[in-house]
Image (spheres, rainbow, N blue to C red):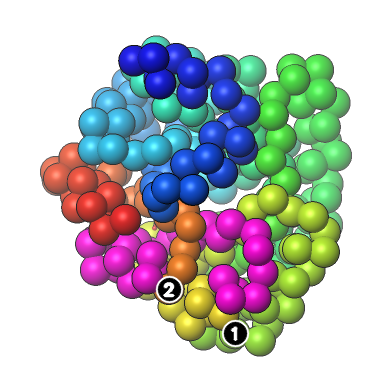
Amino acid sequence: MRRGIEVKYMNVYKNLIETLKYKRVHMTLIDPAAQIPDRAVELAEKADKAGTDFFLIGGSTDIDSRLMDKTISRIKEKTDKQVIIFPGSRSMISRYADAIYYMMLMNSTNIDYIVGHQIGSAGILKMLGIETIPMGYLIFEPGMTVGRVGNARLIGREDENTALSYAFAAEFFGFKLLYLEAGSGAPEPVGCNVIKRIKESVKIPVIVGGGIRDYAKARSVIEAGADIIVTGTVIEKHENPYIALKDIINAI
Ligand code: 1GP
């Protein structure tokens, strides 16, 4: 409990980096647009019990701050784990969150996703004092909904050279995290050779998400070098979310 209380008040990025010193990290994505808050809380409790390290709340469907507030405040009543906003637009802000991924969709063709939503939300973020974590976000094939909504010029899931150029650019911009996204519900995560090549070449912690639904997939992504893995679909769709998630978390 003491560790729980300390973590609750610790800077999120600092907590993440401290955690990465002794283990890889699992994050559970919960999309408030995909279920009512009661169900979101139920899923979060199961993920907490299965051993997830952080919660990401958000997704690519635009939702308002009231639904974000309701979902996040209720989840925080049930867990000491930190909650990070994973925004799909400028309106997805909640004062109850511990931090927000302040992200650039680097391979978007739409300026709104590169810098527009970020400018649109900057005033409110400053006012609320929410911790912002600068993150480069790259969408790979097949991209799924986020690839379409974000107008992404998708990177091939085995295209090491293009991915590496983006990763270098992310480092030069000073991003503190780099997220390699295949899209929620993708049949496969980003290719292992891409993950490996990026890990060998840049120092930023790498997040891999999209298409990780079982132990074997989680294991291969971790062995390729991912520091953090994100899963969402498995907890929403599996008939036994606790067992499915526990299996994935065992892989890390
Ligand atoms: C989506 O990377 C996340 O942004 C999670 O993907 O739903 O496929 O686990 P899944």
Query: Which SS class for mark 1?
Result: helix
The quadrant in which the N terminus is found is top left
Q: Which residue is mark 1?
A: 160
Does the CB distance between marks 2 and 1 fall below 8 Å?
no
Work out whether residue 238 can be spotted.
no
Q: Nearer the viewer, residue 209 or 187?
A: 209
The quadrant in which the C terminus is found is bottom left
**Magenta stretch: includes residue 214:** yes
Q: Which residue is mark 2?
A: 224
In space, the residues marked 2 and 1 are separated at their CA atoms by: 13 Å
Say which amino acid is labelled 1.
Glu
Q: Which residues are magenta?
A: 198-223
Q: Residue at x 82, y 32 (%)?
A: 122
How many numbered marks have been drawn onto this rendered protein structure? 2
Q: Is residue 72 left or right of residue 49?
A: right
Query: Quadrant location of residue 13?
Result: top right
Q: Nearer the viewer, residue 70 or 230?
A: 230
Instruction: List the single residue furthest toward the front.
Output: 22
**Magenta stretch: includes residue 74:** no
Q: Residue at x 38, y 65 (%)?
A: 222
Q: Is residue 5 left or right of residue 220?
A: right
Where is ligand 1, by quadrant?
bottom left
Say which amino acid is labelled 2.
Ala
Percent coordinates x, y for residue 98 in the rendering: 58, 25
User: Could you say which disc has been placed on residue 182 in the image?
Assistant: none
Percent coordinates x, y for residue 248 in the rendering: 26, 54
Work out whether residue 214 can be spotted.
yes
Q: Residue at x 42, y 48 (%)?
A: 22
Percent coordinates x, y for residue 27 in the rendering: 42, 44
